[in-house]
Amino acid sequence: MATEQDVRGMCLALPGVTERSSWGQPAWFAKTLMARIWEDGVLTVKTAEREALAGTEPETYFWTPHHERSPQLVLVRLARIGSDELAELLEESYRLAGGSGA
């Protein structure tokens, strides 16, 4: 089970990532938004595998109508993933958001 504190620590450990508020929630930015708390216990990240993730683990990965126009965004229920999986998601999101090595 991952927590918001896990997200914060992993994001801020990546080169050049900053934290600021977005829509009243904690958010982390590389060159662009890479992760944001959507609501309590739910994180938004960027991924190239949104359809596959939501298709195989719909209890963990999903999106709302708000995210339809942004095919890289997926919502993640933090209580349903471990720290290794979270780290992988955040590293991919970091690259997609223009972080070093993108």
Image: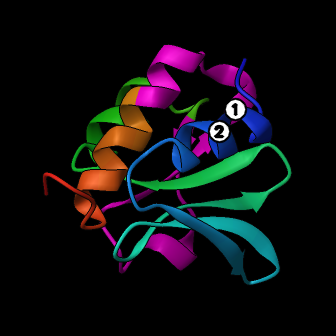
Residue located 75% across and 25% down the image: 79
Q: As drawn, is 75 to the left or to the right of 15? A: right
Of the pair 67 and 40, the residue shown nearer to us: 40
Q: What is the number of the mark on residue 33?
A: none
- Assign the C terminus to one quadrant of the image: bottom left
Label 1 close to label 2 by CB (< 8 Å): yes
Residue 24 locus on image (x, y percent): 82, 80
Neighbours of disc 1 within 10 Å: few (<14), some (14-19), many (20+): some
Q: Residue at x 51, y 41 (%)?
A: 13
Helix, strand, or loop for circle 2? helix
What's drawn in magenta, residue-wise? 61-87
Q: Disc 2 marks which amino acid?
A: Gly
Q: Is residue 13 above or below residue 99?
A: above
Q: Please, what is the three-letter code of the amino acid marked with disc 1?
A: Asp
Q: In this rendering, is residue 18 above or below 20?
A: above
64 lies left or right of 17: right
Query: Does residue 49 belong to the magenta stretch?
Result: no
Q: What percent of the width, then of the height, locates residue 49? A: 25, 43
- Asked which secondary structure carries label 1, the reply is helix
Q: What is the CA distance from the residue labelled 1 to the residue labelled 2?
A: 5 Å
* Left or right placement of residue 56 versus residue 51 in this view: right
Which label was assigned to residue 9? 2
Q: Which residue is mark 1?
A: 6
Relative image position of residue 52 (x, y in whole percent): 27, 35
Question: Residue 37 versus residue 69: which sits nearer the camera?
Answer: 37
Image quarter of residue 10? top right
Kindly identify the residue that appears in the image at 46 percent across and 21 percent down.
85
